[in-house]
Image: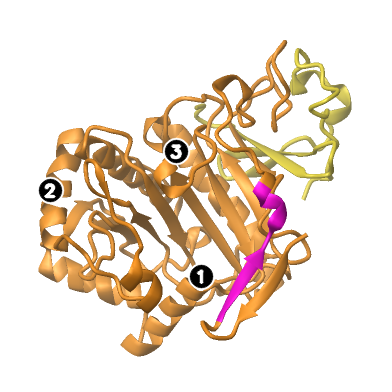
Chain colours: A orange, B yellow
Amino acid sequence: VTELRFNELRGEQVDYAIHRQERTFLPSREHCPLDPTLPGRPPTEIPFPSFEIAVFENRFPAFTPPHGAAEVVVYTPDHEGSFATLTPRRAEDLMWVWRHRYLELGARADVDYVFIFENRGVEVGVTLHHPHGQIYGYPFIPPVPMLELAADERLGGCAPCSLLADELRDGRRIVYESPALVAYVPFAARWAYEVHLVMREHRPSLAACEPQELGELAAALQTLVRGYDALFDRPFPYVMAVHQAPTAGWSPATAEGRGELGAGHLHAEFYPPLRTADKLKYLAGSEQGAGAFISDTLPEESAAVLRETIVRAG
Amino acid sequence: MARKRTAPGASGHDAGEDSEDRPDQDAEKHEPFGPLAVERHVKDDGRALILYTDCEGGP
């Protein structure tokens, strides 16, 4: 059972899911719950000896129907590896899985915002190492997407479209480009190696993308993660957040992939906590108490290093 | 949307039995979505499980 409480002082919802205290925490290799269930081995969350991509309702959910959803997305039956080591085809299939979940969860009356994300590395609180991500279906529009909608208002149109145009004009912070996508360290990045991967065309969500754009999105995400891993020659921890149009107020036609998807611009944001190979950026007094980020690095310099590393990593 | 089917539970599942071998699950088994086949299950504890399989190019 989960409970939402509104924090008046901060103007935000806080989700209480106290059963999550008991969730599986860094199990031994032989007890990974995201492996297939193999003969003679302990049963896992996926009771089949083989699969390609699996999605299931989280055993320790932050949100439950009829007040939202929490799902786990297992990228591969292989315990080792990462998003970057998936075959290109599997990575592209994953984009279709994300699209499927976006449409299906978004159609639910109790889901106002579908949030696809991946936490990678113990530095950001990962409790299972098997390559996987998560999806939350929030019963409200969370603060960060609300801020993006407010930015649309402030800029008089789609904020990601406007910011992408600024970044392309400047050029110094761009780290990757393909026909359909651009990745850059934002002008006012919070994290040393923060990257935003943005669709060139205005696409509110995965549901609005052409098939080849989904393929390019998968390739771009894999290229970025390979670059991150090469940066300090170690698996690079990050939070990856996929931002799309809210699904509040969808019509049945929208849920079927037709009609207006609403305000939003599909992009993925990476928040890596490392500022050097062995130093983490902590959210301390200014960040937590005042809400003001203080960065030790300049986005232009980080972008130059990351751009070169991405090329080197291939 | 395909009707939901009950998957073998983790506790009682014969791990040697592949899902392809269960004839009662063949009807309405795959729901197409882009290049994927979508296969829905319900775990023993009632949670949904969806398996996605590439129908076009393989992994």
Q: Which mark is residue A245?
A: 1
| Residue A158: x %, y % from top left | 37, 78
Q: Is residue A313 above or below residue B33?
A: above
Q: Is residue A309 left or right of residue A102?
A: left
Query: CA–CA distance between discs 1 and 2?
Result: 32 Å
Q: Which mark is residue B6?
A: none
Q: Secondary structure at mark 2?
A: helix
Q: Which residue is mark 2?
A: A305
Q: Amino acid at mark 1?
A: Ala
Q: Is residue A12 above or below residue B54?
A: below
| Residue A263: x %, y % from top left | 48, 77
Q: Answer with mark 3 or mark 2, whichever residue precedes in sequence.
A: 3
Q: Answer with mark 1 or mark 2, whichever residue precedes in sequence.
A: 1
Q: Which residue does the image show at 28% across and 37% down from the upper left? A: A229
Q: Secondary structure at mark 3?
A: helix
Q: Which residue does the image show at 28% across and 33% down from the upper left? A: A234
Please state, as top left, top right, bottom left or bottom right, where the N terminus of chain A lies in the image.
bottom right
Stretch in magenta: A12-21
Q: Amino acid at mark 3?
A: Ala
Please say whether residue A249 is visible from this viewpoint. no
Q: Amino acid at mark 2?
A: Val
Q: Which residue does the image show at 58% across and 62% down from the upper left? A: A114
Please state, as top left, top right, bottom left or bottom right, where the C terminus of chain A lies in the image.
top left
Q: Is residue A250 left or right of residue B12?
A: left
Please give the chain letter of the residue carrying mark 3: A
Please give the chain letter of the residue carrying mark 1: A
Q: Which residue is mark 3?
A: A91
Q: Answer with mark 3 or mark 1, whichever residue precedes in sequence.
A: 3
- The local crowd at label 2, few if under 14, some if 14 to 19, many if 20 or more residues have their Cα within 10 Å, is few
